[in-house]
Amino acid sequence: MDMSSPKDVSKALADTVVTALVDKLKAEAEARGGHLTSRDLETMQADFNRQVEALSSVFEQSFEVYVKARERAVWDKQRNYPFDRLMVKKFSNLFRESDEIGPDDLSRRMLPGFFVALGMMLGTEVVEKYQQKIRTIVDKVKAGGKSVFNWDDVYADEVAETVSLDAEVGIAGYFEDFDKRAEWFIDLINNHLTPPEPSIGAAAGWELNHAGLKKFLSALLTDLSANLETDNGKMRITKRFGADTCADLFDILTRIKE
């Protein structure tokens, strides 16, 4: 089942339940000459209960994914997801709200969809591994003796830079078939937008479009792009991921910048 959109998941689950119910009723009616009694329906209740139990885990998973994405959208108020902060920092300067926003701009309302996409593009286990690595850096910075905690100290850490680059390589590779993935990503973002605040004006009707997607990707993949523009950077990518991957990444970034 496609878990990328609450709307799609809800419809799929509803269709599954209704279809199962109707099919069961039709099969039982045909087996009994076209008629069902109250006792027949009571007998079928056990079968329906088993199907509900099987579907409950799917319901739970879909709602958990959605709730966690909403929770993670409040990234500037939490320290539970420092890897998210690391990635969002790359494009947060592009956010426009209220009447400032244009059709090709970005809105903070995209964050839940971005976090869902991040898990799908990198894999939830990889994302959690990156979260833990950045949490360790956060703890180190906290213990560093400075009176004021500064996230810039976390972003500048050498391990954080490596995590960021590895993540960018994984994300860029996901867009090898750019046209297909662009449609997927835009739909996912627009299906997970946070509800608009009454005060944000024009941003209330905002949705991500193709031009906005390219602006977003260019900002998100800044470190990767910078590495591919220098000989030392290309060597770093080649040693870590291989020559073929390095060449593919160059082609993908060229496509994004068209």
Image (spheres, grey):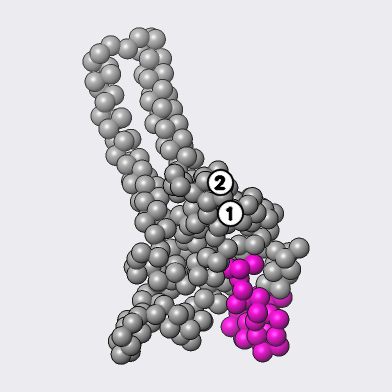
Q: What residue span does the magenta drawing correspond to?
A: 218-247
Q: Is residue 234 magenta?
A: yes
User: What residue is drawn where x is 30% and y is 90%?
Assistant: 145
When asked about the image quadrant of residue 170, the answer is bottom right
Residue 234 vs 15, above or below: the answer is below
Q: What is the tally of numbered marks visible in this picture?
A: 2
Query: Which of the numbered marks, if any, corresponds to residue 152?
Result: none
First-in-chain label (2 vs 1): 1
Residue 136 coordinates in the image, percent (x, y)? 35, 80
Residue 240 vs 120, above or below: the answer is below
Dot 2 lies on which element?
Answer: helix
Neighbour tally class for label 1: few under 14, some 14-19, many 20 plus, Cα within 10 Å: few
Residue at the disc numbered 1: 100
User: What amino acid type should be assigned to the residue bearing mark 1?
Assistant: Glu
Confirm whether residue 207 shows in the render: yes
Residue at the disc numbered 2: 202
Neighbour tally class for label 2: few under 14, some 14-19, many 20 plus, Cα within 10 Å: some
User: What residue is drawn where x is 39% and y is 31%?
Assistant: 17
Residue 119 coordinates in the image, percent (x, y)? 47, 61
Q: Viewed as shown, does residue 167 lie left or right of 76? A: right
Circles 2 and 1, Cβ within 8 Å, touching? The answer is: yes
Dot 1 lies on which element?
Answer: helix
Residue 113 coordinates in the image, percent (x, y)? 49, 54
User: What residue is drawn where x is 41% and y is 22%?
Assistant: 22
Q: Is residue 256 magenta?
A: no
Residue 144 coordinates in the image, percent (x, y)? 33, 89
Q: Nearer the viewer, residue 120 or 23?
A: 120
When asked about the image quadrant of residue 126, the answer is bottom left
